[in-house]
Image (cartoon, rainbow, N blue to C red):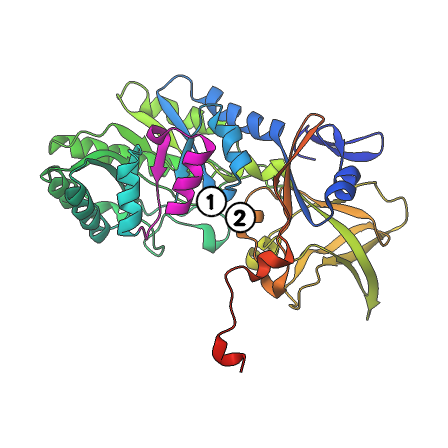
Amino acid sequence: MKTPFIAYKQGRLHIEDIPVETLAERFETPLYVYSRGTIEAAFTSYQKAFTEIPHLICYSLKANSNLAVAATLARLGCGADIVSGGELRRALLAGFSAGHIIFSGVGKTKDELALAIQKNIRMINVESEEELRALNEVATSLKRPAPFSLRVNPDVRAGGHPHISTGTPKNKFGVYHKDIFPLYEWARKQPFLRPVGIQAHIGSQITKVAPYKRALAVLLDLVQRLETIGCGIEILDLGGGLGVDYHGDNPQTPQDLANLILPQVKGRGLQLFLEPGRSIIAQAGVLVTKVLYRKGAGGKQFVIVDAAMNDLARPALYDAYHEVIEARPGKGRKVTLDIVGPVCESGDYLARERSMALPKQGDVLAVLTAGAYGFSMSSQYNSRRRAAEVLVHGKTVDVVRERESYDDLLKGETIPESLKK
């Protein structure tokens, strides 16, 4: 286990003070369970690391936008990094201060930009010249200021899977760093645009802090050059992206990142923004599932469970590794097996080639490090109801999202009258 809040006690796996088997029995499976203590400890590790400089840690809601998860962080003074109008509404409902919200994303609509301006959020991270012009058009029509930063593409390769690398010209994100100056100069002349920051986000699941050194050097050089043309920058936004330990990844910590950043930023009069998501919520989440069947086929051993790729897409999407453990450790001889779901796709698996005692029908398993991009990427594929979510705090358990009903699956759908004749 990678967090003290999720551990075996007297031979049974617990989430904080509650046995996983108890949760499975009470709320059925598949089930997402979050440890509030783990969430709070992860955020606190960032706060402590950066106390020496003005900073704002903005939780990236796309990792897990559950209202209770968001509210846990909002009450600690965390900010929010959002990427849609829906996430903006969620952030405000969860209790984040509008002045602590930043809006990222490469394809914001004019309606979303208008909502952000009307809600007085702290900053909009603009990702192209055309988006900047759209922001100006919206701000002018509202006659209200629009504080923004340009998201710079610093040409720094980082992150794990190619789908989560975001900092090179091959990626769709940001304005190439050499092209930002005429945009800032043009923006300074517009009555309602407020160029307050500069931002870069180089990728996700970054386990070593070295790439941040290269990105920081690019940004600080740009800040200095912007000052020479009369464009003073207040906010230096380095994005998120610190990795977690899925399978011996041995990621560096927020303190390691602070040790890299602080000597370069201290005394420059800049406020540092960071946008972690995965590293705050991933290890706090467990996907609990139950064994339906076992079967052997041509020397291959399959364990079929009631969770599937629609519940946790990462293995199918990225060939991602998640540790899977038993609610009660098996005592039999270990075998090599695949843990697969009920969805009609060969790519529907949670784990491949794992060595463990063959579980019995009805046994409860826990898929670890599932808090980030788990439920938030889940779907109703195969007309499967999305899982319930619960939040555990010590001995207290709260349902923070009810399991979908079969009526929920059909909500909004109709059969035209012409097909009823």
Query: Which residue corresponds to the image point at 40% horizontal and 41% vertical from the top-left?
Result: 89
Q: Residues within 10 Å of mark 2 (few under 14, many from 20)?
A: some
Q: Secondary structure at mark 2?
A: helix
Give the extent of the magenta segment: 84-108
Among the 4 quarters of the image, the one containing residue 264: top left
Residue 93 forms part of the magenta stretch: yes
Image location (x, y in percent) of residue 335? 83, 54
Nearer to me, 163 or 96: 96
Quadrant in which the N terminus is drawn: top right
Look at label 1 and name its amino acid. Lys
**Is residue 253 among the parts visible in the rendering?**
no
The answer to whether 125 appears left or right of 33 in the picture is left
Q: Earlier in the sequence, mark 2 or mark 1?
A: 1
What's the residue type where badge 2 is placed? Ser
Q: Is residue 316 left or right of residue 153?
A: right
Q: Measured from the top left, where is residue 67 in percent x and y?
A: 52, 37
Give the answer, above or below, for where 251 lies relative to 164: above
- Left or right: 277 with respect to 181? right
